[in-house]
Image (spheres, rainbow, N blue to C red):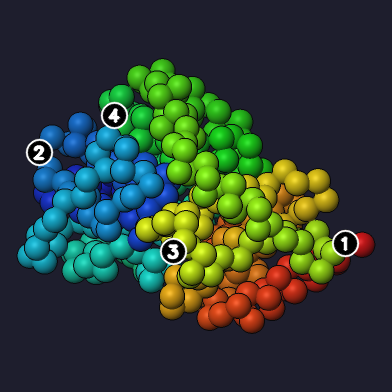
């Protein structure tokens, strides 16, 4: 699957690695993991990783981004990771590169690079980087393995989501055998300070059920977010959506967060393919974990109605 990728790597002396904006564990983990793999196995290359600074995942070793000028892209190879669309990519300068490669596991939306490796059977983009390492017999360092493992854990919901497969566990075993301290990773990911626990409690107190359906939601206004002292609504919106997971009788749950210009929407389900609904509103993602932005509360309520209809189709 990755023959063309390695061939491209061999052809270029400068390699620049991008991923999507507001990086989650998978975006950042795949970026750091690929960076470390290439640095270890192709020591003659000059490699950079670029994009907006991580917040929630800044604890990851290697999370500091490089700051480079436009001229670095001349004659370079650029990677784009974990990005279903061009619009999502952090730092659009990848277009300046001589050749571009995309590695992604989201539902296909568009082609925007020269080499496209898109496979929705993987639970994470990090899983694809693990496959790259194995398929191409690359030397895997503990730093690379830890970054890749972190992204696999977060995008698979701690190995609980439907996307988790036997292959996922095989890769996890491979990574742990190369120096991953899984206890340390889980502690960094899921241990919370008191302020975060209080924010989580505030979100839980706002859970509502839409019109007696199997759809639960939380709606957060700009004022409520400010009152909670939240400085990064995007990360919080993603991080708090699953406080509604595992509620009996609820099959779909959505977190809405106003950011002053639009409403961020995080959609999740343990049963239904919610991606088409997210796509209708300009978003996308996976069958059971998607996101989009809507203009206002009225559109948010229309989205909930569409999800309610989805749950009624199997009655």
Disc 1 element: loop
Q: Looking at the rendered structure, which numbered label has been put on residue 314?
A: 1
Of the residues under marks 2 and 1, which one precedes in the sequence? 2
State if disc 3 and disc 2 touch (CB < 8 Å).
Answer: no
Task: Identify the residue position indicated by label 4 in the image.
Answer: 143
Closer to the eye: label 3 or 1: 3
Disc 2/disc 1 C-alpha distance (Å): 57 Å
* Alpha-carbon span between mark 4 and mark 2: 19 Å
Q: Residue at x 52, y 41 (%)?
A: 197
| Foreground pick, 279 / 115 | 279
Q: Nearer the viewer, mark 3 or mark 4?
A: 3
Q: Could you tell me residue 63's position as x and y percent?
A: 27, 43
Q: What residue appears at the point 42 percent right and 50 percent down from the top-left corner?
A: 24
Q: Which residue is mark 2?
A: 44
In three-dimensional space, the C-alpha distance between marks 2 and 3, rounded to whole angstroms, equals: 48 Å
Is residue 264 visible in the rendered image? The answer is: no
Label 4 vs 2, first from the N-terminus:
2
Alpha carbons under labels 3 and 1: distance apart: 40 Å
* Residue underneath mark 3: 226
The quadrant the C terminus occupies is bottom right
């Amino acid at each position: 699957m990755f023959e063309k990728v390695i061939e491209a790597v061999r052809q270029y002396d400068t390699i620049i690695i991008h991923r999507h904006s507001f990086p989650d564990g998978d975006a950042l983990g795949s970026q750091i993991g690929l960076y470390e793999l290439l640095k270890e196995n192709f020591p003659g290359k000059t490699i950079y990783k670029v994009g907006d600074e991580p917040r929630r995942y800044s604890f990851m070793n290697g999370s500091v981004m490089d700051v480079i000028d436009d001229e670095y892209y001349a004659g370079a190879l650029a990677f784009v990771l974990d990005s279903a669309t061009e619009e999502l990519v952090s730092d659009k300068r990848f277009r300046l590169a001589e050749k571009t490669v995309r590695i992604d596991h989201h539902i296909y939306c568009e082609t925007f690079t020269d080499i496209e490796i898109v496979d929705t059977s993987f639970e994470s983009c990090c899983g694809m980087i693990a496959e790259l390492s194995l398929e191409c017999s690359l030397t895997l360092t503990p730093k690379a393995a830890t970054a890749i493992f972190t992204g696999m854990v977060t995008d698979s919901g701690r190995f609980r989501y439907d996307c988790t497969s036997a292959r996922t566990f095989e890769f996890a075993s491979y990574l742990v055998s190369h120096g991953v301290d899984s206890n340390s990773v889980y502690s960094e990911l899921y241990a919370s300070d008191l302020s975060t626990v209080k924010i989580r409690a505030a979100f839980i107190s706002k859970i509502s059920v839409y019109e007696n359906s199997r759809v639960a939601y939380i709606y957060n206004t700009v004022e409520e977010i400010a009152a909670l002292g939240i400085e990064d609504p995007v990360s919080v919106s993603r991080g708090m959506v699953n406080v509604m997971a595992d509620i009996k009788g609820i099959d779909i749950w959505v977190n809405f967060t106003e950011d002053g210009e639009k409403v961020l929407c995080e959609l999740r389900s343990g049963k239904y393919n919610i991606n088409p609904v997210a796509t209708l509103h300009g978003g996308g993602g996976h069958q059971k974990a998607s996101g989009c932005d809507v203009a206002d509360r009225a559109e948010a309520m229309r989205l909930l109605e569409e999800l309610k209809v989805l749950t009624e189709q199997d009655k």
